[in-house]
Amino acid sequence: MEKKIAVRLFENKKLGTTYGKGLFHTAVFNASAEIKDPHTKYLLDFYPYAKWEHSANSDQQIAILNEVAESCSANDLVSWVYRYNAVTKQKTFVYGAGICDLVNNKLLLAVTDADAGIEQVWQLPIKTCIKTHENAPLLLATNGELADW
């Protein structure tokens, strides 16, 4: 059975700014993915595919890159997946990736997180959000009714 998930994509307000000499923030969107049961939160930073593929720096990330390379186009935005612990504010890399296709308004998210007991692939439609306040997401991808959360 598919787990209920909500992925909120936010504008990266640091896009194009520097964080060191010759180093620029290049993530187009920052996102959070929340699974309802078991309650788990993941953080994603969506980069253009060419930038993302050169950011792989571990054997696990190389393996993920090889798995998703055929599924991506040059126009896609792609992210590694990090589990977020709200108590310790710690981010832990988990095996998975998110592929954001803004041409077809689809999000593919694959997560294999043994510690949380989650092994799932979601294909979600992306919808635009009405900006009601400063911290509202720009885009939303979900397979459940948010009013039930």
Image (cartoon, rainbow, N blue to C red):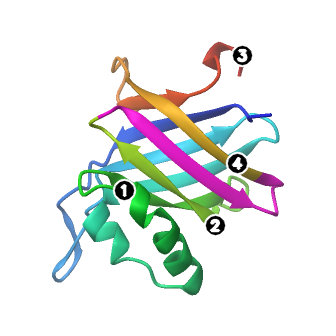
Residue at 32% x, 33% y: name it: 104
Q: Nearer the viewer, mark 4 or mark 3?
A: 4
Measure the alpha-carbon separation of dots 4 and 1: 19 Å
> In terms of depth relative to the viewer, which is nearer, 25 or 61?
61
Question: What residue did someone put label 2 on?
Answer: 95
* Earlier residue among tags 4 and 3: 4
Mark 2 neighbour class, 10 Å CA radius: few under 14, some 14 to 19, many 20 or more: some
Q: Amino acid at mark 1?
A: Cys
At mark 2, the secondary structure is: strand
In the image, taking residue 120 as reference, residue 33 lies left or right, namely left
* Earlier residue among tags 4 and 1: 1
Q: Amino acid at mark 4?
A: Gln
Q: Nearer the viewer, mark 2 or mark 1?
A: 1
Q: Nearer the viewer, mark 4 or mark 1?
A: 1
Residue 111 shows in this picture: yes
Residue 137 shows in this picture: no
Question: What residue did someone put label 1 on?
Answer: 72
Mark 3 neighbour class, 10 Å CA radius: few under 14, some 14 to 19, many 20 or more: few
> In terms of depth relative to the viewer, which is nearer, 136 or 76?
76
* Earlier residue among tags 3 and 2: 2
Magenta residue span: 104-118
Measure the alpha-carbon separation of dots 2 and 1: 17 Å
Measure the alpha-carbon separation of dots 3 and 2: 28 Å
